[in-house]
Image: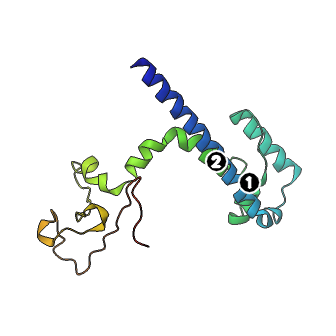
Amino acid sequence: MGTVHTIENHLTAISRTIRRVLVSYSERQNIQKKRKLIDKVSLTETQKQEIKEFFRKNYGKSLSTAWHRLYQSYTGIYCKDYFPEILFSTRLEPKLNPYREAEILGDKSFLPLLFSGIEGLHIPPNLSILRKRHIQKREQCSVIPSRSLYVIIRPRQMRGEKDDRHQ
């Protein structure tokens, strides 16, 4: 089993690295699209130096001021300690919110299983649906909203399942 765990750990590390590289590429593409907003803001030499010193001290290297100028173009506020989106999405978020755990917590169908025992927390009832988008008969559903006039059911496409809605 040690070999299996070692391989799993290596594959997970490779997956994280690929994800970080792709997100970084996407963030860089995104900031290029917003070049007109960035170019409208000019920082003084003192402000540029403050940003560089702040990130050298706290991050170990300096960053492009484009992120700060984009933030300032939105808010009108200069902030030397603004935490750029590229650092958030490529460094902080993967550590605080690992992808596999986030994927599970992001699936709303798991909410009752994970949080049903918390007092004062209201979790909306779910209607059960079968795979292949066939809705169970009303009497087969485990929970039916009693006061609702309309019920919206959002079908989920399971991994590996072909989407047959457009055939």
Is residue 61 at least partly visible in the picture?
yes
On screen, residue 68 above or below 39:
above
Helix, strand or loop at label 1? It is helix
Mark 1 residue type: His
In the rendered view, does 76 fall on the left or right side of 105?
A: right
Q: Residue at x 57, y 34 (%)?
A: 14
Q: Return the x and y of residue 54 as percentages of the image width and height.
A: 74, 40
Outermost residue on the right side: it is: 45
On screen, residue 15 above or below 127:
above
- Quarter of the image that includes the C terminus: bottom left
How far apart in space, not on screen, are marks 1 and 2 (Cα)?
22 Å
Please identify the quarter of the rendering in which residue 34 is found. bottom right
Q: Residue at x 38, y 47 (%)?
A: 104
Q: Residues within 10 Å of mark 2 (few under 14, many from 20)?
A: few
Q: Return the x and y of residue 162 as percentages of the image width and height.
A: 41, 60
Helix, strand or loop at label 2? It is helix
Q: Residue at x 42, y 43 (%)?
A: 101
Q: Residue at x 30, y 67 (%)?
A: 133
Mark 2 residue type: Leu
Query: Are the two marked residues, 1 and 2, in contact with CB atoms closer than 8 angstroms?
Result: no
Q: Relative to the observer, which residue lies in front, 60 or 79?
A: 60
In the rendered view, does 165 fall on the left or right side of 112?
A: right
Q: Return the x and y of residue 159 as percentages of the image width and height.
A: 40, 53
In the rendered view, does 166 fall on the left or right side of 118?
A: right
Please identify the quarter of the rendering in which residue 16 is found. top right
* Mark 1 / mark 2, whichever is N-terminal: 2
Q: Residues within 10 Å of mark 1 (few under 14, many from 20)?
A: many
Q: Which mark is residue 68?
A: 1
Give the residue pinned by disc 2. 22
- Quarter of the image that includes the N terminus: top left
